[in-house]
Image (cartoon, rainbow, N blue to C red):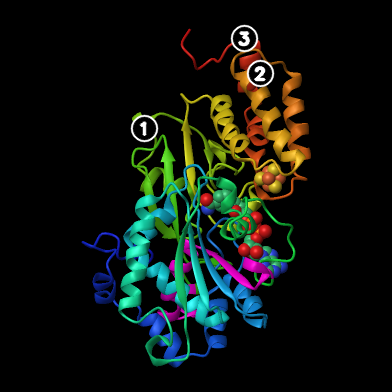
Amino acid sequence: MEKLLLRNVDKENSHTIDVYLSGGGYRAFKKALKEMTPDDVVEEVKISGLRGRGGAGFPTGMKWEFAAADVKEPKFFVCNADEGEPCTFKDRVIIEKDPHALIEGMLIGAYATGCRYGYIYIRGEYPIGRKILERAIAEAYERGFLGENILGTDFSFDLYVHSGAGAYICGEETALIESLEGKRGEPRIKPPFPVNAGYLWKPTVVNNVETLANVPLIIERGGKWYSQIGSPDCPGPKLFPVSGKVKRPGVYELPMGTPLEEIIFEHAGGIVKDRKLKAVFPGGASSSVLTSEEINVPMDFPSLAKAGTMLGSGAIMVLDETDCIVKATLRLTEFFRHESCGKCTPCREGTDWLVRILRRIEEGKGSEDDLDVILSISETMENSFCGLGMAAHNPAASTVRKFKDEYLLHVKLGRCPFRSV
Ligand code: NAD
Ligand code: SF4
């Protein structure tokens, strides 16, 4: 497949505006600004079928339509670059290697929705990305793509970078907005959705980095062209970060809907030392596990939902036969316990109890009843206030269901069978 999202990343100095312009950069923005009305742009994105790449897969054109229809001013356009899910490192490639594609996507989105100010909220752990973005924004101002009356039109847009302080919950869009306002990053109740009441309670579009990098392609080549790539009801190119026990870990650009098995065994080279694949978390750390018998599944939002898990950020984490499923689950759940903001009881208490129970099973001190307790806690966590708590129990609940024998072996042996004695 022709490289689309990663078309620039192997070029020398790909992060500079000169290299971006020499490859046709900012042509789509000029086209939108000079030849299309804001409504035309929204319509083109709707035709493309682009769905958000942050994890939830909400239709981007629809989000923009809602924001464009809101008359409150000023409106804000925010890029969520708080990429914090364990094993998710796809946005980083765009931020560091092709920052102008992100800025161009934001400019087109801001024009389409009538936003005057923009923020890129980048995770604190991406200091290099922050510097690269700041330099790219300065270059875009110098060349007249940002600021007042851009390219002689009445469209004005100012863009700033804001760095997070290391809290995973700030990737949740309403916690991100709270943090941007200078407050503690805790989620707000939804609705109202940010498109109507976001930053400073004004209409605010929040889009993920990868989502925005798709936008110049759609405007330049057309929504119809884009809609024919990948899965019909979930089209476009997709970045898949693959990690764990594969021979060639990395970020792969493939059409949405590429089978998981193909990604692992063809693109990522198969399992290290040709061992057996044991399990895969197909959509980041908060997705439900798939067994080796379940990996012939198209990697898109509807197919993975049908398979009882989710595409999420598209981050594929592979475990082989030498990995302990209990230990892997414990590690993931420890992450969520640490990152739970503590605002609501099911998540604050649930993640803590899951960690305690998983740890005692892993240490060989658990009982068979613990498995039912894990499932019961998971059920309660479904009622958490935000997506973090609603999904944090997925690794525990799904591995207990699908790898029950391995959990029971820990109980029976009184130790981890994968640990040398
Ligand atoms: P969500 O379904 O609540 O919302 C998705 C987006 O659509 C949001 O921008 C929301 O404002 C918008 N939206 C939804 N319904 C709307 C409506 N009726 N009107 C207007 N706008 C509407 O999901 P979420 O909680 O924002 O995101 C959850 C996802 O984030 C999970 O699936 C998870 O995979 C992912 N995630 C990603 C990372 C990462 O690092 N990329 C980290 C953690 C979680
Ligand atoms: Fe905070 Fe977790 Fe509740 Fe979300 S689910 S509000 S992260 S405690």
Q: Between tags 1 and 3, which lies in front? A: 3
Instruction: Look at label 1 and name its amino acid.
Output: Val
* Residue under the image location 43 percent in, 84 percent down: 148
Residue annotated with mark 3: 414
Instruction: Look at label 2 and name its amino acid.
Output: Leu
| Residue 298 in sight here | no
Q: Is mark 3 within 8 Å of ligand 2?
A: no
Tell me the quarter of the picture where residue 180 sits: bottom right
Measure how far apart labels 1 and 2 are at the Cα level.
27 Å
SS of the residue under disc 2? helix
Residue 214 lies within the magenta run: yes
Q: Quadrant of the N terminus?
A: bottom left
| Residue 336 in sight here | yes
Res 408 label: 2
Residue 53 lies within the magenta run: no
Instruction: Look at label 3 and name its amino acid.
Output: Gly
Residue with the most extreme left position:
12
Q: Which residues are magenta?
A: 197-226
Q: Position of residue 51 (x, y in %)?
A: 56, 66
Residue annotated with mark 1: 272
